[in-house]
Structure formats: C-alpha cells, structure tokens
Image (spheres, rainbow, N blue to C red):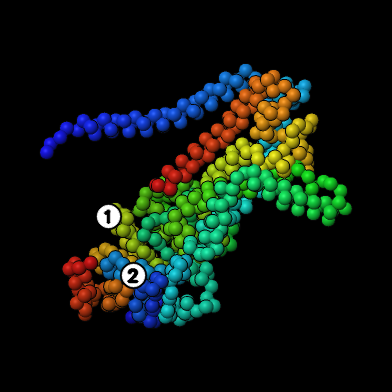
C-alpha cells in the first residue's frame, strides 16, 4: 500500500532539531564562558598587569610572577618530558615488535597514565620527588639540612612532566608513523644502520610532530594546578624563583587563591577575571599552533 | 654463460606458516640484466628482497637455504647485514627520495659511509647523477628539494642515490611501474647502460619490458621458480607450458 511520508518527516525533523540544538548548546557554552571572562577581565588586563608584581596583599597590582612561574614551569617540564617521551615513542615505533608483550605493556601504561586524575600526580610528586628523592638528597649531600626535601619548581616541573608524558608520546608516535616504510627501507638499502636511519631520516621527517607534542604538553601543563599544589606552587612570594629549589607562583593556582583565599575576594574579582583571561589566551594560542602544525603533518601524510 | 654473481640453493621463505618461496635454486650472471616475472603474489618481489636481506626487517619471516654472492653465503650468521647492503643497491617500485635536497639525497649513502669532505662528495654526487642520466636536468638546482622533481626524475635520482654507494649489484623492484611511457623508456635505456658495470636483477610486471632489457628471465609462480633461461628462449620457445601460457597472456 502506498502511504504518505508525513509521519516520518515529522520524526526526522524532530531528531534533526534535537541534535542541532545540543550542538548549538556547546557553542553557546563556549561563547558564554568567553564573554563572561573577557567582559570581567578586559578592564584590568593591560601592560602593567602582566609586568608588575601583586600589591597590597594581592588586591592590586599585576601577576608577573605567576606568568614568569608558569613559563619557567613549562620550560623545565618540556626539557624533561620531550626527550623522554620522544625516546619512548621511538622505541615503540621503531624497535618494539607491534604485538609483543613489552609493547603492549608500555602502551597500556601510557593509556593508564593518561587517565590518572591529576591530583594523584600531585600526591605522587609529593611522596616520590619530595619525600623520597628530595629528602634522600638532603640526607646524602647536605647532612640532613632542608633544601630539596620541600616543594620547589624542579619537583613541580617533573611532576608535571609525568602528567604530560602520554601527550608527548602519542603525538611523537603519530608523527613517526607518517614516515613511510619505503623511506626507512631506502635508507637501510643504502647500508645505513637502523640508528642512522632513525637519526637522519625518521626524526628530521617527524620534527614538526615532535613540536606538536611539545606544544600540546606545554598547553596542558600551563593550565593544570593539581599536580603542583603539593610540589612547588606558592601562595605568594615576593621574588621570582632564581634556583631550582625555589617555590614559584603560577597562573592557574593564582586564580584559585584570588577567588578563595584573598583578603578581599570582591575587590580582586577583576584580577581573577584578567588572570583567567591571560591563562586562556596562553593555552588557546598554544593549542592553535599545535593544531596548525598537526594539520600540516596530516596533509603531508596523505600526499 | 658469464661468471655467476648470485647463486641460490634450495631457498625457502615462510611468512609465519605460509610458504612464500618454495625451493628456489638459481644462478644469476654477473653484469647482465636478469628479469623476474610472474603474476602478483608469485614471490618474485619476496625473492628479490632475500638478496639484500630486506626481508630480515619483517616480523615472523623464516628463511632456509643458502644465497651466495661471490661465493659467500649471505645468510651465514657472521655476515654484517649493514655492510652487505652497501654492495647491493635497491631501487623501489615507488620512487622514494628523502625529503632533502637533490644533492643530499645522493650524498646520503657516501655520508653514512664516513665521507665528509665536500669536494669528494661533490665528485661522487656528480658522477652518480651522470651515470643515472639525470645530471643535465638537475645540475643547476642540486640544492632544491628532491620532492619537486617529476616521478621519472625522482626514480632516476633514486638510482643515482644507489650508484653513489658504489654497489656491485642493483636490485630493482618494478622501478618503472608507476611511470609514464617516456620516463619508462628513459629508465630502460639507463638499465641497459648500467649493466656494463653492475649486475642487475629486476622485477617487472611488464612482459615487453622484460623482453626488451633483460638477458635472463626467471618465471615465478606460486612461490616456485617454474622456468629460468635466456630471455630469448623464454619468450620464443619456453620449455614449460605454464610459462608459455603466462607470456602469451593466457593467465596471470
């Protein structure tokens, strides 16, 4: 029997509308967040704000030490995470047999590491780097004097490096896999050793992927607070860190402090917004750079 | 027949449990072109890759039997595979220049062999490019990216890259299959030229190509070497019916 399609049309239209609504909702949420933050922060964000120290019990002034601390944190973190992550990725793609027990175990560990809540990394950093390594170093080299056995920028950076390691490994692995088998074979057929092939063909070819991994790790690290809570972030310090054993201020933690611990929370509201805005601009631009580089790699891989 | 360069004896190769080469015994003469023909999956490329031990790189490959090059068994456990590959160049089906300049592509092999003197490298690169009949096309842009060359030029560059290491044998795995007719004929001319100095083993799907450029032809089918003889004989009067059927296009 021939029927009309009216019923089905109504159902279809309804479903399309529902899916579109939820998609638009996502956009709305982002727009609202950005709108609120920009509106609240733009009046305070200026050159002085990003270059000056906090003043008057952190109710006035700038956030320079937090920016500086964040930058230093991600730099030290990258120095630790990028080489380590790259080497692991090289092992996984170039040396380990695809389905060997060891490769599977490493991949499982990486996936697990990626989903561990960041506060756990903070606790791990406190227990391992500070209580175990730091206190051990003090006992061994300083006769028990307290220097390394307390929170500082080194331990915070290393803790953050552990957190971002999976990001680095996965990005670098993806980049290494875009180097065609043909090129590796061409190099080996010319009498190159495996290591020469990796060093001269594979790594140069995936350099931009290594960069992407680094940037993604940095942007992840720049926004995280939990791992550094116990391991090095300070409420307020009057000077910039000048040694690896110093504590430091950091943007994400600064927002938290300003909004919960400040002497005058209402008065610091514009500072909170402006600090959030700085953090957002920082992570957005880092992510954007990573996305652009990754897009270029993918396009190259397709070709 | 001239002096033999490569000699295989009872060579078997397995991918896991699957037999890919079944009891291959063959003698390949020096400074001649030997063509390997047969339908896809017949084992001809696999066989080619046993000659420079490229199959070593693939997991789960097991090889039995012997391959002698200049009377040395290259599957002997004391053989230095990296060093072996310097004597046996390889040109691949798809041209695969490195994402480096034309000069750096050709200089790659000499450099890994420890040659770092600039004028020496320049000499090697120039000679290799001339011998690969591409010098005139690239001499003014040696430091441009190799990826800017046409497919045919890239393939000749890959041949030059192989020549720069000064091998004695060149293995070619369907080197012209992805090229247009003009580029193909250039590669074929080059192969005929190169056999004066090198022993060449070439896998090809193109029967006319095998007939045009090779001195010896080996017909592979289902992992077995069915027939191996002078090219002229294989293409005019093969002993085995399967060979004849394949060559006349009745199957494959």
The residue at the point 28 percent across, 73 percent down is: B221
Label 2: which secondary element: helix
Quadrant position of residue A246: top right
Screen quadrant of the C terminus of chain B: bottom left
Q: Nearer the viewer, residue A50 or A302?
A: A50
Q: Does residue B69 lie above or below A236 as drawn? A: below
Quadrant position of residue A24: top left
Q: Nearer the viewer, residue A232 or B162?
A: A232
N-terminal of the pair, mark 1 or mark 2, is: 2
Left or right: A155 as drawn, with respect to A212: right
Q: Does residue A272 lie above or below B179 as drawn? A: above
Which dot marks residue B181? Answer: 1
Which dot marks residue A139? Answer: none
The residue at the point 65 percent across, 47 percent down is: A121
Q: Nearer the viewer, residue A256 or B238?
A: A256
Screen quadrant of the N terminus of chain B: bottom left
* Residue annotated with mark 2: B44
The residue at the point 72 percent across, 26 percent down is: A262
Left or right: B84 as drawn, with respect to A157: left
Left or right: B118 as drawn, with respect to A47: left
The residue at the point 37 percent across, 57 percent down is: B94
Q: Nearer the viewer, residue B191 or B146?
A: B146
Judged from this view, the residue extending furthest toward the left is A1
């Amino acid at each position: 029997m021939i029927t009309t399609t009216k019923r089905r049309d109504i159902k279809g239209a309804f479903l399309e509308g529902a899916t579109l609504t939820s998609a638009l909702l996502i956009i709305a949420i982002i727009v609202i967040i950005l709108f609120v933050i920009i509106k609240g922060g733009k009046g305070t964000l200026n050159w002085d704000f990003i270059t000056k120290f906090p003043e008057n019990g952190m109710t006035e002034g700038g956030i320079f030490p937090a920016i500086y601390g964040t930058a230093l944190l991600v730099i030290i973190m990258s120095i630790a995470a990028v080489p380590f992550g790259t080497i692991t990725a090289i092992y996984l793609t170039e040396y380990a047999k695809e389905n060997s027990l060891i490769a599977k175990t490493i991949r499982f560990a990486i996936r697990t590491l990626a989903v561990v809540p960041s506060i756990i990394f903070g606790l791990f950093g406190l227990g391992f780097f500070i209580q175990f390594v730091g206190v051990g170093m003090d006992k061994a080299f300083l006769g028990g004097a307290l220097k390394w056995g307390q929170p500082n920028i080194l331990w915070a950076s290393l803790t953050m490096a552990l957190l971002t390691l999976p990001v680095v490994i996965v990005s670098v692995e993806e980049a290494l896999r875009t180097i065609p088998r043909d090129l590796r074979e061409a190099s080996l057929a010319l009498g190159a050793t495996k290591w020469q092939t990796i060093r001269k063909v594979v790594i140069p070819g995936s350099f931009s992927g290594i960069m992407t991994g680094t940037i993604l790790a940095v942007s992840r690290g720049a926004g995280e607070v939990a791992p550094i809570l116990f391991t090095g972030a300070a409420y307020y310090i009057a000077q910039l860190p000048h040694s690896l054993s110093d504590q430091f201020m950091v943007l994400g933690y600064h927002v938290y402090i300003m909004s919960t611990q400040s002497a005058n929370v209402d008065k610091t509201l514009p500072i909170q917004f402006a600090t959030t805005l700085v953090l957002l601009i920082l992570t957005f631009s880092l992510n954007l750079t990573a996305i652009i580089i990754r897009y270029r790699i993918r396009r190259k891989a397709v070709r | 027949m001239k002096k033999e360069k490569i000699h295989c004896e009872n060579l078997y190769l397995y991918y896991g449990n699957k037999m890919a080469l079944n009891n291959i015994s063959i003698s390949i003469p020096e400074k001649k072109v030997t063509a390997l023909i047969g339908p896809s999956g017949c084992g001809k490329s696999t066989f080619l890759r046993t000659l420079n031990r490229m199959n070593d790189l693939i997991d789960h490959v097991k090889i039995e039997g012997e391959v002698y090059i200049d009377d040395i068994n290259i599957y002997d456990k004391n053989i230095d595979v990296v060093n072996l590959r310097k004597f046996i160049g390889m040109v691949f089906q798809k041209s695969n220049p490195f994402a480096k300049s034309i000069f750096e592509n050709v200089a790659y092999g000499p450099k890994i062999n420890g040659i770092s003197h600039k004028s020496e490298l320049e000499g090697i690169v120039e000679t290799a490019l001339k011998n690969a009949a591409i010098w005139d096309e690239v001499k003014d842009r040696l430091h441009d990216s190799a990826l800017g060359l046409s497919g045919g030029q890239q393939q000749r560059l890959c041949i030059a890259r192989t020549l720069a290491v000064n091998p004695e044998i060149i293995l070619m795995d369907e080197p012209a299959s992805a090229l247009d007719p003009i580029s193909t004929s250039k590669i074929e001319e080059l192969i005929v030229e190169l056999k004066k100095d090198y022993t060449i083993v070439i896998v090809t799907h193109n029967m006319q190509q095998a007939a045009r450029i090779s001195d010896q032809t080996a017909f592979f089918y289902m992992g077995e070497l069915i027939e191996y003889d002078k090219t002229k004989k294989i293409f005019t009067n093969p002993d085995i019916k399967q060979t004849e059927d394949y060559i006349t296009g009745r199957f494959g």
